[in-house]
Image (cartoon, rainbow, N blue to C red):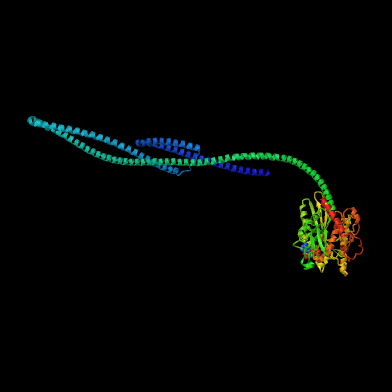
């Protein structure tokens, strides 16, 4: 739950970060939009101002332009202006709408500057036009004045001309009247003479008047000429002024054309500007729309993002809250759970304890029962068991009749073997007989129960008994490729110990010793020559121990191999002839298994003694001397003592003569009590060895056939026959000193043992 919570918290943080990012983006977008709208608003403001300016300019122009043409222009311009204003208004409306929607920036466009330049040019042109107009007006005035004067002069001239014509007419009429009068007078000579005379009288007066008139006429004619000249001058002047006027008019026309052109240009430019403005507005609008669209899309994306995020956030928040609640409740829950778990655990522990106690009780009871049963079984079977093993014929046996096989087996009974001795077939019954083809493995299978019982705390002795060359060492040690009981036993112990490692702690130690001429030597010690003593444990347990005997702790097969090798080397370096020596001494491998049951604290100690006995062949008879004889005597003595002890144990005698030899004394606690003993009697099947084979088998049968039970014990109270007596029926057998007790005959023993065997078999 914690892990998932942590994970969810992490997820939540990540989503919150994402949300923040998106919000930031949104804010930036909004800022952008705001700035854009502000920019557009500014642009609109400037455009408005410009419009106002233009309107003002137009009105100014309108006020300034006075002429009719100009007025016409003004009207036109006003109409245009009105139209433009309306358009402007529409644009403004559009712009406002645009602004309302979302405005895109219309940055300072170059047209505005151009517009300003043109406007300036326009104003300059207008100024020039104005100046021209002023000049024109001046000239007009001048022309008017001159025309007026001219009219005056003309009027005066007309008046004087009319006066002159009247005068001339008057004069010509008088002249005609006078001439008529003359003629009439001439016709009337008297009268005429009179008249002539009067006329002559009167003619002077008339002549005077005529002269006067003539002079006056002259004056008037002069005046007329003068007036005519003035008129001519005036005409000339008029012509000149008319020319000037025409010139001025042309100039005005030119100016007006220019003005018109400028106006047209201005209009065109204004139109172009308008178009550009419209275009710019359109562009800005479309750009704004596109941007707006993008912004909208963005916004929509953000919105969808937000929408998709929102449920996630909601679930996260929900999860977080529930987790928070859980976390808050967790300690309480945990406490509760812990409490209940503790209670449950303690209850379970209690239950387990009680079950354990019960089981332990049962286990102990079972153990005791098993031990009892085992003991009973051992008691019934005898805790001393005797096996026989016949080795195969080897090359060393040579060929010919000497190497012929003298041992045969019973096909139906693996406990019986027959020996052909001196033409007679003697049958022997043991606990088990291994034929020559029996493998090391098979042999070990029969003894492994003994070995494992050592783990349970039992003491075990396995002896290999027989004449030299019968296969004792082969059975006990074996070869490197085919190891014997020693190595297999240790291997089995290791594997058994490993199997029990869950409950038990085991320590396996190994010692190797040799008994030669009743002297005990440590084969693993630093000083093999040193004779060791067997002593009673000072703890009062009655147990024996050998001070100074080396013990190696072994944990693997490699360890054992090392130990064996070490022991061998000791033996080899100490002896000149190992084979000879080994056959004259008892070799012991003592394996101690100490166990501790961790649950119960139970401690067990089991000892496994694997003994390769000295050769049982009799040498005394052949008149051996010196050390050879001494060796033979020691061997004889120790093997007899072993027989005695086994006999005493098997017949449950009160006294068991352990102290009679070093070997039995050393193995005392491994032979008595619950201890188990296996005697492996090795025999050679060769014809030449039949006599020794017979002895060995007799020894085996005797060991085995000791009657169980107190009655028979009592009845069979006595000493074990000496090695020499094993020959039994041999007439030349020398009685050993101090061992002259009679022993039961082989036949008797054989039948008795058979009956016991049958009993055991029927009892299961
Ligand atoms: P011991 O120790 O009794 O003197 P050994 O064990 O040395 O006798 O045996 C004498 C010879 O017989 C050895 O070469 C050994 O390999 C051989 N031998 C003994 N028993 C067997 C057997 N069961 N199978 C094969 N060879 C054997
Ligand atoms: Mg040997």
- x, y percent for residue 358: 81, 44
- For the N terminus, the image quarter is top right
- x, y percent for residue 33: 52, 40
Q: Nearer the viewer, residue 323 or 427?
A: 427
Q: Nearer the viewer, residue 27 or 706?
A: 706
Q: Quadrant of residue 636?
A: bottom right
- x, y percent for residue 279: 44, 41
- x, y percent for residue 47: 46, 39
Q: Is residue 298 left or right of residue 521?
A: left
User: In the rendered image of this protein, does residue 59 appear above or below residue 556?
Assistant: above
Q: Is residue 437 left or right of residue 294?
A: right
Q: Quadrant of residue 274?
A: top left
Does the image show residue 679? no
Question: Residue at coordinates 44% horizontally, 35% vertically from top-left?
Answer: 90
Q: Is residue 110 left or right of residue 355?
A: left
User: In the rendered image of this protein, does residue 61 appear above or below residue 615?
Assistant: above
Task: Tell me the quadrant of ligand 1.
Answer: bottom right
Does the image show residue 214? yes
Give the total of numbered labels: 0
User: In the rendered image of this protein, does residue 443 appear above or below residue 34?
Assistant: below
């Amino acid at each position: 739950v914690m892990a998932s919570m942590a994970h969810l918290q992490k997820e939540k943080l990540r989503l919150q970060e994402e949300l923040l990012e998106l919000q930031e983006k949104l804010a930036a977008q909004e800022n952008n939009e705001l700035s854009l709208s502000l920019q557009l608003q500014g642009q609109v403001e400037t455009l408005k101002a410009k419009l106002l300016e233009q309107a003002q300019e137009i009105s100014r122009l309108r006020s300034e332009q006075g002429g009719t043409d100009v007025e016409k222009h003004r009207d036109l311009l006003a109409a245009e202006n009105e139209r433009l204003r309306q358009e402007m208004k529409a644009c403004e409306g559009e712009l406002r709408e645009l602004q309302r929607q979302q405005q895109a920036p219309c940055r300072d466009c170059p047209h505005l500057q151009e517009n300003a330049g043109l406007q300036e040019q326009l104003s300059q042109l207008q100024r020039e036009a104005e100046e021209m107009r002023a000049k024109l007006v001046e000239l007009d005035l001048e022309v008017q004045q001159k025309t007026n004067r001219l009219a005056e002069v003309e009027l005066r001239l007309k008046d004087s001309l009319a006066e002159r014509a009247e005068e001339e007419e008057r004069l010509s009429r008088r002249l005609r009247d006078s001439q008529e009068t003359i003629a009439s007078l001439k016709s009337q000579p008297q009268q005429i003479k009179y008249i002539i005379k009067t006329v002559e009288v009167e003619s002077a007066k008339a002549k005077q008047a005529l002269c006067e008139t003539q002079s006056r006429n002259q004056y008037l004619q002069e005046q007329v000429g003068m007036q005519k000249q003035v008129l001519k001058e005036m005409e000339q002047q008029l012509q000149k002024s008319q020319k000037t006027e025409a010139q001025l008019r042309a100039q005005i026309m030119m100016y007006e054309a220019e003005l018109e052109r400028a106006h047209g240009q201005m209009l065109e430019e204004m139109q172009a500007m308008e178009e550009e403005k419209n275009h710019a507005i359109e562009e800005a609008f479309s750009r704004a729309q596109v941007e707006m669209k993008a912004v909208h899309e963005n916004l929509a994306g953000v919105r969808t993002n937000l929408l998709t995020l929102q449920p996630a956030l909601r679930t996260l928040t929900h999860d977080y809250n529930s987790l928070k609640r859980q976390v808050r409740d967790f300690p309480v829950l945990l406490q509760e759970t812990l409490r209940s778990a503790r209670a449950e655990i303690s209850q379970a522990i209690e239950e387990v304890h009680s079950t354990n106690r019960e089981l332990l009780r049962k286990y102990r009871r079972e153990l005791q029962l098993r031990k009892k049963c085992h003991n009973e079984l051992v008691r019934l079977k005898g805790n001393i068991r005797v096996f026989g093993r016949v080795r195969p014929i080897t090359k060393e046996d040579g060929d010919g009749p000497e190497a012929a096989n003298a041992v045969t087996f019973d096909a139906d009974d693996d406990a019986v073997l027959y020996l052909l001795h001196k033409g007679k077939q003697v049958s022997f019954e043991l606990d088990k007989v291994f034929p020559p083809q029996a493998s090391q493995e098979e042999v070990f299978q029969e003894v492994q129960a003994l070995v494992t019982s050592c783990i349970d705390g039992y003491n075990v002795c396995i002896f290999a008994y027989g004449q030299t060359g019968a296969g004792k060492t082969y059975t006990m040690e074996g070869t490197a490729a085919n190891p014997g009981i020693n190595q297999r036993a240790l291997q089995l112990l290791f594997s058994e110990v490993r199997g029990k490692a869950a409950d038990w702690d085991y320590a396996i130690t190994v010692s190797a010793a040799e008994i030669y001429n009743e002297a005990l030597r440590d084969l693993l010690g630093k000083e093999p020559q040193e004779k060791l003593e067997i002593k009673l444990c000072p703890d009062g347990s009655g147990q024996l121990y050998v001070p100074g005997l080396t013990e190696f702790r072994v944990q693997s097969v490699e360890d054992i191999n090392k130990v064996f090798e070490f022991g061998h080397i000791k033996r080899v370096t100490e002896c000149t002839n190992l084979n000879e020596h080994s056959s004259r001494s008892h070799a012991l491998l003592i394996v101690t298994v100490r166990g501790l049951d961790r649950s119960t604290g139970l401690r067990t100690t089991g000892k496994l003694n694997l003994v390769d006995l000295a050769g049982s062949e009799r040498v005394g008879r052949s008149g051996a001397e010196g050390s050879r004889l001494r060796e033979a005597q020691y061997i004889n003595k120790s093997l007899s003592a072993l027989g005695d002890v086994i006999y005493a144990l098997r017949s449950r005698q009160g006294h068991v003569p352990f102290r009679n030899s070093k070997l039995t004394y050393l193995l005392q606690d491994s032979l008595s009590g619950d201890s188990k003993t296996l005697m492996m009697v090795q025999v050679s099947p060769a014809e030449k060895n039949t006599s020794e084979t017979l002895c060995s088998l007799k020894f085996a049968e005797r060991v085995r056939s000791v009657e169980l039970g107190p009655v028979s014990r009592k009845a069979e109270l006595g000493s074990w026959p000496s090695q020499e007596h094993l020959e039994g029926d041999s007439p030349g057998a020398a009685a050993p000193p101090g061992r002259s007790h009679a022993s039961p005959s082989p036949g008797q023993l054989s039948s008795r043992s058979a009956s016991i065997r049958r009993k055991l078999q029927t009892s299961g």
